[in-house]
Amino acid sequence: MTGAQETPLLDVAGLTVSYLTRNERVHAVRGADLDVRAGEIVALVGESGSGKSTTAHAVLRLLAPNASIDAGTVRFGGRDLAALSERELRTVRGARIGLVPQDPGVALNPVKRIGEQVAEVLRLHGLATRRTAPAAAVEALERAGMPEPGVRARQYPHELSGGMRQRALIAVAIAAGPQLIVADEPTSALDVTVQRRILDHLQHLTEELGTAVLLVTHDLGVAADRAARIAVMSQGRVVESGPARRIIEDPQDAYTRRLLDSAPSLTAVRARPRPAAPAEPGEPGDVLVTAEHLVKDFPLPRGRTVRAVDDVGLTLHRGRTLALVGESGSGKSTTARMILRLVPPTSGRIVFDGEDVTAATGAALRRLRRRAQLVYQNPYASLDPRFSIGEVITEPLRAFRVGDRASRTARARELLDRVALPAATLERRPAELSGGQRQRVAVARALALEPDLVVCDEPVSALDVSVQAQVLDLLAELQDGTGLAYLFISHDLAVVRQIAHRVAVMRAGRIVETGPTGAIFADPAHDYTRELLAAIPGGDARIGAPGARLLEERT
Amino acid sequence: MGRYVALRLAQAAGVLWAAYTVSFLVLDLLPGDPVSAMAGAAADQAGVDPAQIARLRSEYGFDDPVPVQYVHYLGRALRGDFGDSVASGRPVTSVIGDALPSTLQLVAAGLALAVLCGGGLALAATYTARRWLRQLLLSLPPLGVSVPTFWAGLMLVEVFSFRARLLPAFGNGGPRGLILPAVTLAIPTGAVVAQVLAKSLLTTLDEPYVQTARAKGAGRPRIHLRHALRNASLPALTVVGVLVGQLIANSVVIETVFSRNGLGRVTASAVSAQDIPLVQGVVVLGSLVFVLVNLIVDLVYPLLDPRIAAAGGRRWRPA
Amino acid sequence: MSSTLDALGVLDAAPEPGAPEQAVRRRAGAARTVRFFLRRPGLVLSVLLIAAVVLASFWPGLFTSHDPLKGVPAQAFRAPGAAHWFGTDELGRDVYARVVHGAALSLKATLIAVAVSFAAGGLLGLLAGFAGRWIDDVLMRFVDVLLSIPALFLSLALVTALGYGTVKVAVAVGVASVATFARVMRSEVLRVRQAVFVEAARSCGTRWYAILGRHVLPNAIGPVLVLATLDFGTAVLAVSSLSFLGYGAPPPAPEWGTLISDGRNYLANAWWMTALPGLTIAATVLATNRIARALDGEWGRR
């Protein structure tokens, strides 16, 4: 970055931040360098634990009480923020640097009205009086793209959707007309389509106002779409930074390359080898599961009901992967749970390998339990913390009284080997493993009884991208050459593209479109599918990237 | 809102009825009955005619089967008649009514002290940036809940009445006589209030919305009082609702220690005399106070937290 | 919060397991335990104190050679000193000896009280939480009613019904805490029952009794045990309150609450007869609360 003759708006140099835990000092940021010029969007990218959030918060000195800035400077507008007194800092926060926090669900005070919370920042910096503040707050909300800002200002946070809350937080951040906005994973907690709209608006708004943005994200796709420059963080250091296009197309650092390789939204570019077209679907003996006209109503207070799943039908073939795609609340998880008979369907019919299991009880239900397994989204919650890994994996065997103790342990060892974990893991507890390792254990447990069907409910969405890729590879590998069928539930089309043979898109309890993966991606028929596809981050970067012919390759 | 209030009133009535039933069942466990107890006491002085006892027993209805007795007594209780005290022969309601004002005075003073001191301590402990001061302040409430109430009262008497001769030790003598009992009553309650509020303030101060407020440029006092306190006071409010009942019950011990007249003394002597109607009246009164206070808490809740108003008044409860 | 998690994420990369590491890890665990206690002198003191109280209740002779019941009239009202650590009472009995010998009665009452509330409350809560539906509704309404009666009033009603004596007082105190135990047990069972790993066990075919025994109970019992430790302190206070009011063991038995009640008559001239037994009670309760706090959080976070 030699070309910048102007002094940057924000210049972080040699920043070192550590947390004091009970036993030791943990260094979260170790000498990070970063700069943001006026009016520019810079993305700070890294996986969890890379120190990116800490760096962003250190700019505003909004660190946890046990954290301290040990070295380095944060120069902003000619002053070193790291050396300012708390009183001086308060004149910078909100007024000259705004923050858009991570999770809009919890970042607004639940007992105060939206308008009041936006007005507070104006009142604090003397930009509005008690009389003018309400109107100014509505105006800020309007600029943040809040629909019906006058009405929303009088509402409480719980009365708004996630997207609207995030707009309220953007209004708070821009209200005082700051020169810099620090946006910490501003949309990670939101659905993809909402995410896209919010980021579009933020980008548009900051261009218009000439505000610079430091965008913290784990998603290289988002960074590639939005930022002029990207800084990649790993283990507390900025390992590479430069113009966004250069980073995407010609990464220099090994870590950046690894991150790029595993980022699902960008990997569409590389074809992941899937097993060569298995037996043509449609052969009679080939069908494993059919669901017809599935409906699920959940009761609400006062005798009302809400229809979570509405007339869903799907067919799953042996050895194939069917992905069920949709945003949160679309009914995809409920559909899968009905097929597993964990949730009773309100109406409809489920046939598993030729047997009607819709109302199966007793022995028939236990046969289904033996042949259909489930892998959960959150590997931290799905393993009993008191069990050893060996106990976790052998639990299904014990439940069906398969073998004796010794043979079950042998089987557990074999399964660990198949999911590429060392045998010594057997004695450990879930808490001692990383997220990716735990998800491997969950997969091993699901395979213990050699089932015909494994339902994967968002199996990688809680994992870091590089780990995501490993788990997806593992799932694909385990399916190769066996008759194992996956029902793969995901909100992330980029992930689905890597693993699924067929895709069913769900929205508001209904399936709006079904088809082979390639066809869905290349030629979506339904508007909603197109909207979902357009919302995949990294789209802009993909177009210019080499190997964009993938879509053809996949079909 | 009207629906919510009606629902809560119905629930309150249900709890009261059930409390009456529980106290009836518990006291029915008693081997023997009040008439025999009275007769037993009288027998020491003079021979009592067994026929007379039998007549008394049937007069009080003790010969009837338990369900019949229950319906009979419940019907009377619904009309506000809890029977006569066995020991004094006066109606239970008037015995309690006479004793209540002095105890309510004590409880009100104790509650006010507990909330002010406990709340103040929690605020100060979470506000201060000095580690040692915070540690010191936070170590006080655990002491407060560990000390036996009656012993604390006696120690206060020893120091402030016998040694310093500042305050009266015993009796009902005016506002000065109220100070020591009220302080004693407030110690365990205030300690609980302080513990709950401090814990809840510390959790609240860790919430992301507090960080949002800091990012706006708000200073510590504003964050503490305007953002955190209102959110943090909800669990404390629930606890206060429970503690008022305990305060009334603790008056039994406090009034005994300070030889004050009031409901507590009445209860203590009723237990000693196995005066069942009176004990039952006190138990139902305790339950009534609990129900009323919690009704108030439930009605205040939606005012403090709009989410509860939206959810039809389902309030936060401790685990 | 997020930034703290970020920082902890640094530690998340678990080391690769290896066979010789087992012994190393075990030794590191022992070292951590030692360090845990060294950093908490208050906790160590609490454990020692409770151990002493337990010892005193079984072998009071270990702590004192004085007779708690036989007085030396000539030595009445001696202030605390080398001969009589806690002084002597109106009959010349050694107050320290009476406190030591009183430990047995007080501890027995407390244990009975905690056992009653733990067993009854735990069962109620387990049944309500695991059975659910109408059973849950009925049981919890009952518990709500118990909660609505102030604990001391409920105990007093039971004392009225049952009569006086250490065991009866203990039962009365225990029943008064049943509701709290039931609430905690139920909410823990519900929490664990809704945990993803329980559904995972169900979906791979584990039967309900195995889920209850292997997953729900072991994961739900922790907070209930912490409550039991806390309740130990509460029960000490409640039992001593009732015996102070005169419903406990008949004199001359040296129950702790009774000792204070006796001393009360001589408060003006013999403060030690009240102050020192009271301090013993306060120290015992403080110690159990400290241990409960350690069990509750610090130990798990170690």
Image (cartoon, rainbow, N blue to C red):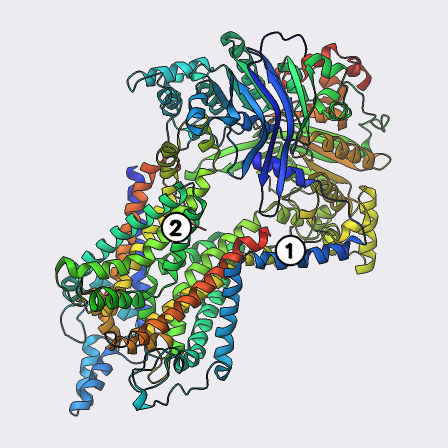
| Label 2: element kind | helix
Instruction: Look at the picture and state if A15 lies above or below A131.
Output: below
Instruction: Look at the picture and state if B313 lies above or below B14.
Output: above
Residue B81 image position (x, y, % from top left): 18, 64
Which residue, given by chain and number where applicable, does mark 2 sit on?
Answer: B137
Quadrant housing residue A521 = top right
Which residue, given by chain and number where applicable, does mark 1 sit on?
Answer: C32
| Label 1: element kind | helix
Residue A494 image position (x, y, % from top left): 70, 23
Task: Evaluate if marks 2 and 1 touch, with contact meaning CB atoms under 8 Å apart.
Answer: no
Which residue is at the far bottom?
Answer: B47
Crowd band around label 2 with a 10 angstrom C-alpha radius: few (<14), some (14–19), many (20+): some
Q: Can residue C124 be seen in this view?
A: no
Residue A69 image position (x, y, % from top left): 56, 32
Q: Residue at x 51, y 29 (%)?
A: A61
Using the image as rendered, state which of residue A239 and residue A337 is in the foreground.
A239
Q: What residue type is labelled 2?
A: Leu
CA–CA distance between discs 2 and 1? 29 Å
Q: Can residue A188 be seen in this view?
A: yes
**Residue C32 as seen in the image, left or right of residue B219:** right
**Residue B113 as seen in the image, left or right of residue A15:** left
Using the image as rendered, state which of residue A163 and residue C89 is in the foreground.
C89
Quadrant housing residue A7 = top right
Which residue is at the far front?
Answer: C82
Q: Which amino acid does label 1 sit on?
A: Arg
Please, which chain is the residue tagged with disc 2 on?
B
Quadrant housing residue C238 = bottom left
**Residue C182 as seen in the image, left or right of residue C144:** right
Please, which chain is the residue tagged with disc 1 on?
C
Using the image as rendered, state which of residue A252 and residue A108 is in the foreground.
A252
